[in-house]
Amino acid sequence: MISETTMLAEQCRLREWAAQIRDCQGRPAGMSVVEWCACHGITKANYYYRLRRVRKACLEAVQEEMPAQQVVPVQPELLQLRVQEGRKPQPGLDISIKGFSIHVTESTSMPLLTKILRVVKHAE
């Protein structure tokens, strides 16, 4: 079991690494990652290790925020065909909220739909 102290140390280290990564990504034009690393006393391999760890932590945080995917039964008479010029008709569900209309199909990505609904929720 990981102790709270270990978790806090890891979070602190990840924040420090994230700041370094932002600093490196904002380096002057023409300066390579290798040059930036040399100026900051880390190896290129260590920089990319830190980048990988920070990205992984960010991805895990985003996945924790996402609600579990749920299947909601929809009555067939609510489904509509949306025809766009030059494309074949797409069956789906039209959702209207706060003046926004969203056409959802089987291929609509759940993460995208979640983000859109989050934005619409806060729209005025």
Image: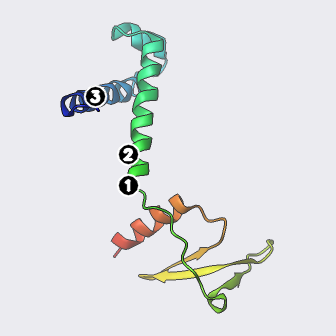
Does the residue at mark 3 contact the one at mark 1 (Cβ under 8 Å)? Answer: no
Neighbour tally class for label 2: few under 14, some 14-19, many 20 plus, Cα within 10 Å = few
Amino acid type at circle 3 is Glu
Quick check: can you spot residue 97?
yes
Amino acid type at circle 2 is Ala
Q: Secondary structure at mark 1?
A: helix
**Residue 16 x %, y %:** 28, 26
Residue 90 in the image: above or below residue 24:
below
Amino acid type at circle 1 is Glu
Residue at 61%, 80% (x, y): give it.
93
**Can you identify the residue that label 1 sits on?**
65
Q: Quadrant of residue 71?
A: bottom right
Direction from residue 106 to residue 99 in the image, left or right: left
Does the residue at mark 1 contact the one at mark 2 (Cβ under 8 Å)? Answer: yes
Q: Quadrant of residue 19?
A: top left
Q: Secondary structure at mark 3?
A: helix
**Can you identify the residue that label 3 sits on?**
10
**Residues at marks 3 and 2, CA–CA distance in whole angstroms:** 14 Å
Quadrant position of the N terminus in the picture: top left
Neighbour tally class for label 1: few under 14, some 14-19, many 20 plus, Cα within 10 Å = few
**Can you identify the residue that label 2 sits on?**
61
Residue 71 in the image: above or below residue 55:
below
**Residue 67 x %, y %:** 42, 61
Of the image marks 3 and 2, the number of the one nearer the N terminus? 3
In the displayed orientation, state which residue is furthest to the left.
Answer: 5
Direction from residue 120 to residue 1 in the image, left or right: left
Direction from residue 101 to residue 10 in the image, left or right: left
**Residue 22 x %, y %:** 36, 30
